[in-house]
Image (cartoon, coloured by chain):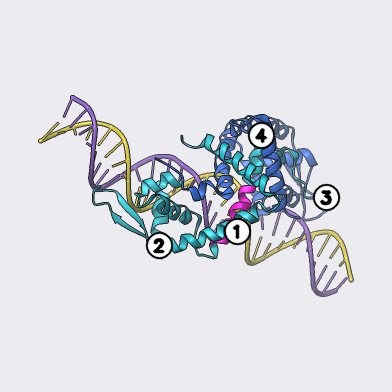
Chain colours: A blue, B cyan, C purple, D yellow
DNA sequence: GGATAGTGTTGGTCAGGCCAATGTTGGAGT
DNA sequence: ACTCCAACATTGGCCTGACCAACACTATCC
């Protein structure tokens, strides 16, 4: 009835972009429960793993445009999950820091996200999940900057 | 320097959505050469494989919202790749048909898209490409409307 | 000192995926 | 025959994520 054209179904680019739609849906549904957006998680994670950073640095690490980092940090500051202060050593630069509230939010999101991974890969046994992750990492690395 | 947070890099949802960004970029770059958009290809492919159809049917087969099908078909009609006429048997329904120009455009896009698949999966040997495609299909099928 | 690269910010664009409301039409139930 | 419901096409709006261009400022390198 609602059969997909073979041309599409067979193409990796189709599979990836369509699966990404479902992944995004699952993720944003999960995050909605925590009142957060996708960009927020990326930034909180980067701050937690690499410590305080400038907005430009965050953008590079999270694959977010600098202009979008501004808005996301604005949101995080308003929610109290992050602090923004001018970098004392570097005039124009900002220094973004994780607050304890931010750490708690990050933990919460981590939990939600683990559940999402499970829903996303539901039909696959553990071995296949690992294989898929490895192959995707390999391909993605090839398209990443340097 | 631009290291990605481990939390992200390890999550299938991240790998899929990020890879989808690159896939979309490659596809749209390729399609730009033919002056077409992503929705166009889907619709042309569905018409070619399943024959003339109503817009609602196209939407279901191509995973496009009804309202977006309207705009896409408008564009295709303007380009002469498709014909739209009221279905004689079914009052409100439209009947969308592929023109010979549409067939040519589809062939052209097919070629462009094959090249894109190659660029996308460049780092993978043939066997891995097949494995990846199989796993993605499996996962995607699980999230599709039965 | 003057060119050059990096930084934060504003504001705008785009594709893709959605939803709600409206007017219309076919068909099923009774 | 009449009513009610489901399907269809269309308009108009919204959201996320990813971009780009321009501006003002700062640091650094030659």
Element type where label 2 sits in the image: loop
Asked if residue B117 is positioned above or below residue A30 in the image, the reply reads below
**Residue at image x 66%, y 31%?**
A114
- From this viewpoint, which residue is outermost toward the front? B127
- Measured in 3D between alpha carbons, the distance from the residue under mark 4 to the one under mark 2, in whole angstroms, is 42 Å
**Residue at image x 69%, y 32%?**
A127
**Residue at image x 37%, y 46%?**
B56
Snapshot quadrant of residue B8 = top right
- Measured in 3D between alpha carbons, the distance from the residue under mark 3 to the one under mark 2, in whole angstroms, is 61 Å
Q: What x and y, as percent, mark residue A43?
A: 70, 42
Question: Can you tell which mark lies on residue B52?
Answer: none
Please report, as a chain letter, where disc 3 is located: A
The reply to whether the C-beta atoms of the residues labelled 1 and 4 are less than 8 Å apart is no
N-term mark: 1 or 2: 2
Please report, as a chain letter, where disc 4 is located: A
- Measured in 3D between alpha carbons, the distance from the residue under mark 1 to the one under mark 2, in whole angstroms, is 23 Å
Please give the range of residues in magenta. Answer: B19-31
Asked whether the residues under marks 3 and 1 belong to the same chain, the reply is no
Question: Can you tell which mark lies on residue A88?
Answer: 3
The reply to whether the C-beta atoms of the residues labelled 3 and 1 are less than 8 Å apart is no
N-term mark: 4 or 3: 3
Q: Residues within 10 Å of mark 2 (few under 14, many from 20)?
A: many
Snapshot quadrant of residue A111 = top right
Residue beneath disc 2: B81
The reply to whether the C-beta atoms of the residues labelled 3 and 2 are less than 8 Å apart is no
Instruction: Using the rendered image of the protein, determine whether residue B74 is visible from the camera's viewpoint.
Output: yes
Q: What x and y, as percent, mark residue B13?
A: 63, 39
- Measured in 3D between alpha carbons, the distance from the residue under mark 3 to the one under mark 1, in whole angstroms, is 50 Å
- Please name whichever residue, A104 or A127, is drawn nearer the observer in this view of the structure: A127
- Measured in 3D between alpha carbons, the distance from the residue under mark 1 to the one under mark 4, in whole angstroms, is 27 Å
């Amino acid at each position: 009835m609602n059969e997909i054209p073979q041309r599409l179904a067979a193409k990796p680019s189709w599979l990836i972009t369509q699966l990404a739609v479902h992944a995004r849906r699952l993720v944003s549904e999960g995050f909605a429960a925590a009142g957060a957006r996708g960009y927020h998680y990326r930034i909180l994670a980067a701050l937690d793993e690499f410590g305080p950073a400038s907005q430009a640095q965050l953008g590079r690490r999270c694959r977010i445009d600098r202009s979008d980092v501004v808005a996301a940090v604005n949101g995080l500051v308003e929610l109290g999950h992050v602090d923004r202060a001018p970098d004392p050593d570097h005039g124009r630069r900002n220094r973004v820091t994780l607050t304890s509230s931010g750490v708690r939010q990050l933990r919460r999101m981590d939990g939600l996200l683990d559940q999402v991974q499970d829903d996303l890969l539901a039909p696959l046994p553990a071995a296949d999940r690992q294989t898929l992750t490895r192959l995707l990492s390999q391909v993605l690395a090839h398209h990443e900057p340097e």
